[in-house]
Image (cartoon, rainbow, N blue to C red):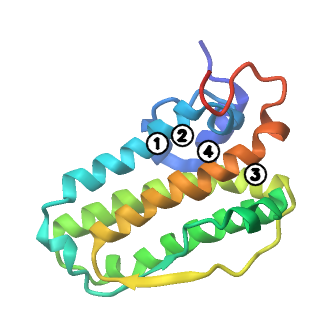
Amino acid sequence: MAPSRPLLLLLLLTGPGCSHLPGVQGKPSDFWCDHQHRTDMQNMTERLARRTAGCTDLDSLPAPIQLPCVSIQAAAWANKSVQQKSAEVMGALQVFHEGLQGPKNQTSSRACLSTLSKLETRISNYIAIVKLVYKQNGASQVSVDRCSSVNSLNQVLRHFGKLLKVKLEALAFALNDSMCNGDQRTLNGR
């Protein structure tokens, strides 16, 4: 069976890293409307964090990584438009992506470089997916609050996991009506 046009578009946008993503079946709405698709991608990052948890090389990066704030204040989030929410998530992903460049270029550890490269690919995949919603909603650039700076890749992985579970999921919930209306699936995968 030939791949659908939306799948080809998604593969083109996310690059070679997307070919190993479980659950990607062709429509960008699959990611946003089916909780299991997002969970599968989150699990890949969690497995990477578990595999590197005991690696001491990853606890002292050659340069600090700036981390975006990933928590949500419920009242403030509820008052934001979908455009503002998607811009905030996109900005946080870009902060992570940009933050990896310094340590990646300065590290001499193969384990560290490998993990940084894998994380960079995962972040790029998320950027490509969020970018579709970001552009579709005509979002403008927002300033991203940076909460801290760390030298531990293990802390970066944990913080990135929080971004996925908190802000990305909150964005998916906000998109439910506009993207998933009429779709048989829900954000809970039911």
Residue furthest to the front: 75
To which residue does mark 4 refer? 12
Query: Whole-Å distance between the Cαs marked 4 and 2?
Result: 19 Å
Dot placed on the residue nearer the N-terminal end, 4 or 2: 4
Dot placed on the residue nearer the N-terminal end, 4 or 1: 4
Q: Residue 148 at what x, y percent from top left? A: 45, 84
Query: Whole-Å distance between the Cαs marked 3 and 4?
Result: 16 Å
Asked whether 50 or 13 is in front, the reply is 50
The quadrant holding residue 20 is: top left
Amino acid found under the numbered disc labelled 1:
Met
Amino acid found under the numbered disc labelled 3:
Val
Query: In the visual, does 177 lie left or right of 121?
Result: right
Dot placed on the residue nearer the N-terminal end, 3 or 2: 2
To which residue does mark 1 refer? 41
Dot placed on the residue nearer the N-terminal end, 1 or 3: 1
Q: Residue 16 at what x, y percent from top left? A: 47, 46
Query: In the visual, does 47 lie left or right of 134?
Result: left
To which residue does mark 3 refer? 133
Callout 2–callout 1 Cβ contact below 8 Å: yes
Amino acid found under the numbered disc labelled 4:
Leu
Callout 3–callout 2 Cβ contact below 8 Å: no
To which residue does mark 2 refer? 38
| Element class at badge 4 | helix
| Element class at badge 3 | helix
